[in-house]
Image (cartoon, rainbow, N blue to C red):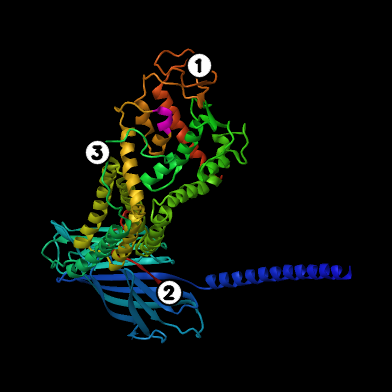
């Protein structure tokens, strides 16, 4: 007893200590958070003025002199300026000054030093004006002058040449109290020259100093706001400079070389490890199942995957064999939302493993007389779907149809391609979110998904669907490729953007091959050829003969229910005893005679309505399929943004 009490006391002490630790950890976290917040708020900056002078040269380059009038407050080390190079060839940086002191290129651990480097599509200048141990700035003014030359930054059209430049960078956290940009052209212009200012600032306007110079001004340019200048001038004043075609040609070829190499590699892998062995098609279409494979197995062997139609076909096949009775109930809203009730009417025995799993998925521990419906299924059946799918696949493996489990093969290539695609997509956000969004939406919807369906349809022998999907693949790919071809050759894209695109497309190529990679054995190939031929027979509306009840589960599993049922319209056939409907009256089966006569009310004697039965079957397939998913849970102008340069700036 004493020992027990000691244990209780010790446990209580441990619990109390745990509470104290959590309490103090929480306090420490709050303190650290407060310290970090204080650090974040301890420094700030803005620009009292940014003055920019641009000298357009006759050789097609232009020299830029930026005067950045900082107001530093806090422990800033110096300044940083990044210039976007998407729409130019290169930046040649010349000088950096603070007042009359010229900074030197070198190790920025020292005051008065700067460094330049490329980061993605940006050219970056970074400099130090204060050592970490020095007193923090206190609303201290600092003026830095940056001098650089832009090469390949002008635009050329058939009627005029153009300077279009984001002179005051928008990627900044602080306000610019006063912005002033002056553009000097190589020679005086006639009065018909044009200038434009795109700005989201106060009192933004421009004026002509003389026939050779223009000035653009604005006040209170808020953080993130644009300030772009545009001057159009007659052709012939400056030399035309191309977009570094040799470099871009290399970049363009690089952008498409890796995906092409990946495609060639995947094609080689497919030919060696994925393509089925050849087997001759039968001379005539079989009019009966080629062998005794159950419907779900036939569906798997044709499309190499298990989905809702195989499970629905199994339910119908079990009903046909006398294990289940199915009743259709009308929808509550103008016939919409039909419900289907399933009753176990025979003790389940001598069933395959996956068939028994379907029974248990419907009825739990099955007993004759148990009932369920599609509404109830939606809350529980989804838990059994993966087990049923695996049991069907395991049966196919037992029969020696596949060299490896199809789903595992598909997932292997998806899990190889998906991280590559995600990596490319994430990197594209560093190149530009709009670029990334365009790629994921356009190529994903209009090329990636259709390509997946196209390859899958071709594997199933559904050449009409494959041809239809190929149209989307061609259009989507052409737009994307064309969208890169034009700017790569005539405008210029940064290497980093092309590199990201390269990675993104390569991952998609790998994933598009995934559905084609499961490989059948010779036995499996023979089965596929025979069952594909039988599918063509079932899908032929003009074909005659066949036992509706016996063949219906195969039509569902092979995805040809509609055309298969149409062939029985007006034919005299026995009733489908395992399926009845309350639509239009009391409970009754779909006809005793199936002779095409008039309806005499519910119950025996109703005529067979092929269209109605087809609609009911399709509705049931949809309803059952929906039940297999998990439940849901509850002066200046506007515009602009097209100019070169820009980028960002601030402190560090």
Instruction: Give the structural element (helix, strand or loop) at label 3.
Output: loop
* Magenta residues (range): 547-552
Cα–Cα span, label 2 and label 1: 87 Å
User: Going 42% across and 65% down the picture, which residue do you hit?
Assistant: 175
**Marks 3 and 1 in Cβ contact (< 8 Å):** no
Q: For residue 551: magenta?
A: yes
Other residues around mark 3 within 10 Å, as few (<14) / some (14–19) / many (≥20): few
**Marks 2 and 3 in Cβ contact (< 8 Å):** no
Q: Which of marks 2 and 3 is nearer the N terminus?
A: 3
From where the camera sits, is residue 473 visible? yes
Name above or below for residue 119 compared with residue 406. below
Residue 604 numbered tag: 1
Is 229 left or right of 380, judged from the image as shown?
left
Q: x%, y% of residue 612?
A: 42, 24
Q: x%, y% of residue 237?
A: 12, 66
Q: Quadrant of the N terminus?
A: bottom right
Dot 2 corresponds to which residue?
A: 651
Cα–Cα span, label 3 and label 1: 43 Å
Residue 560 in which image quadrant: top left
Dot 3 corresponds to which residue?
A: 283
């Amino acid at each position: 007893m004493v020992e027990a009490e000691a244990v209780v006391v010790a446990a209580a002490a441990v619990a109390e200590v745990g509470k104290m630790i959590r309490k103090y950890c929480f306090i420490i976290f709050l303190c650290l958070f407060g310290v970090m917040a204080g650090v974040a708020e301890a420094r700030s900056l803005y620009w009292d003025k940014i003055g920019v002078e641009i000298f357009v040269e006759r050789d097609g380059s232009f020299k830029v002199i930026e005067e950045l009038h900082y107001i530093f407050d806090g422990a800033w080390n110096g300044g940083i300026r990044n210039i976007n190079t998407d729409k130019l060839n290169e930046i040649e940086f010349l000088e950096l000054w603070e007042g009359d002191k010229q900074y030197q290129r070198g190790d920025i651990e020292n005051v008065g030093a700067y460094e330049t480097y490329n980061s993605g599509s940006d050219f970056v200048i970074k400099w130090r004006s204060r050592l970490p141990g020095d007193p923090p700035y206190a609303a201290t003014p600092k003026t830095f002058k940056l001098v650089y030359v832009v090469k390949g930054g002008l635009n050329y059209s058939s009627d005029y040449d153009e300077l279009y430049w984001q002179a005051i960078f928008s990627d900044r956290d602080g306000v610019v109290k006063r912005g002033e940009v002056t553009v000097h052209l190589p020679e005086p212009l006639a009065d018909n020259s044009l200038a434009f200012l795109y700005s989201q600032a106060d009192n933004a306007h421009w004026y002509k100093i003389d026939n050779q110079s223009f000035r653009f001004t604005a006040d209170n340019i808020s953080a993130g706001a644009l300030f772009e200048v545009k001057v159009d001038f007659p052709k012939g004043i400056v030399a035309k400079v191309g977009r570094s075609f040799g470099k871009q040609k290399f970049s363009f070829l690089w952008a498409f070389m890796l995906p092409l190499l990946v495609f060639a590699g995947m094609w080689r892998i497919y030919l060696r490890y994925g393509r089925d062995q050849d087997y001759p098609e039968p001379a005539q279409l079989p009019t009966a199942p080629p062998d005794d494979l159950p419907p779900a197995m036939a569906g798997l062997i044709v499309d190499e995957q298990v989905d809702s139609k195989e499970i629905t076909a199994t339910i119908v096949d079990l009903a046909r064999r006398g294990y289940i009775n199915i009743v259709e109930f009308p929808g509550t809203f103008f016939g919409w939302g039909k419900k289907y009730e399933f009753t176990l009417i025979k003790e389940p025995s001598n069933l395959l493993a996956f068939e028994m799993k379907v029974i248990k998925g419907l009825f739990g521990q099955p007993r004759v007389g148990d009932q369920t419906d599609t509404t109830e299924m939606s809350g529980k059946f989804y838990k059994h779907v993966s087990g049923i799918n695996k049991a069907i696949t395991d049966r196919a493996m037992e029969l020696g149809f596949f060299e490896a489990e199809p789903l595992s093969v598909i997932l292997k290539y998806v899990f190889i391609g998906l991280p590559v695609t995600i990596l490319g997509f994430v990197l594209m956000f560093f190149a530009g979110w709009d670029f990334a969004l365009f790629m994921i939406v356009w190529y994903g919807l209009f090329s990636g998904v259709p390509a997946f369906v196209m390859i899958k349809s071709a594997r199933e022998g559904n050449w009409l669907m494959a041809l239809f999907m190929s149209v989307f693949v061609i259009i989507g790919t052409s737009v994307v490729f064309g969208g890169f071809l034009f700017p790569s050759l005539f405008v210029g894209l940064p290497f980093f953007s092309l590199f990201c695109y390269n990675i993104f497309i390569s991952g998609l190529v790998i994933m598009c091959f995934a559905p084609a990679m499961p490989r059948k054995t010779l036995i499996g190939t023979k089965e596929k050829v025979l069952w594909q031929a039988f599918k063509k027979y079932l899908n032929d509306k003009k074909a005659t003969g066949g036992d509706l009840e016996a063949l219906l589960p195969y039509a569902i599993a092979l995805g040809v229910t509609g055309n298969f049922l149409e062939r029985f319209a007006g034919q005299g056939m026995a009733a489908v005893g395992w399926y009845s409907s309350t639509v239009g009256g009391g409970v009754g089966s779909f006809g005793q005679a199936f002779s095409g006569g008039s309806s005499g009310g519910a119950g025996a004697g109703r005529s067979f309505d092929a269209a109605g039965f087809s609609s009911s079957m399709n509705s049931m397939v949809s309803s059952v399929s929906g039940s297999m998913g998990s439940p849901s849970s509850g002066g200046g102008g506007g515009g602009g943004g097209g100019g070169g340069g820009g980028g960002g700036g601030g402190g560090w």
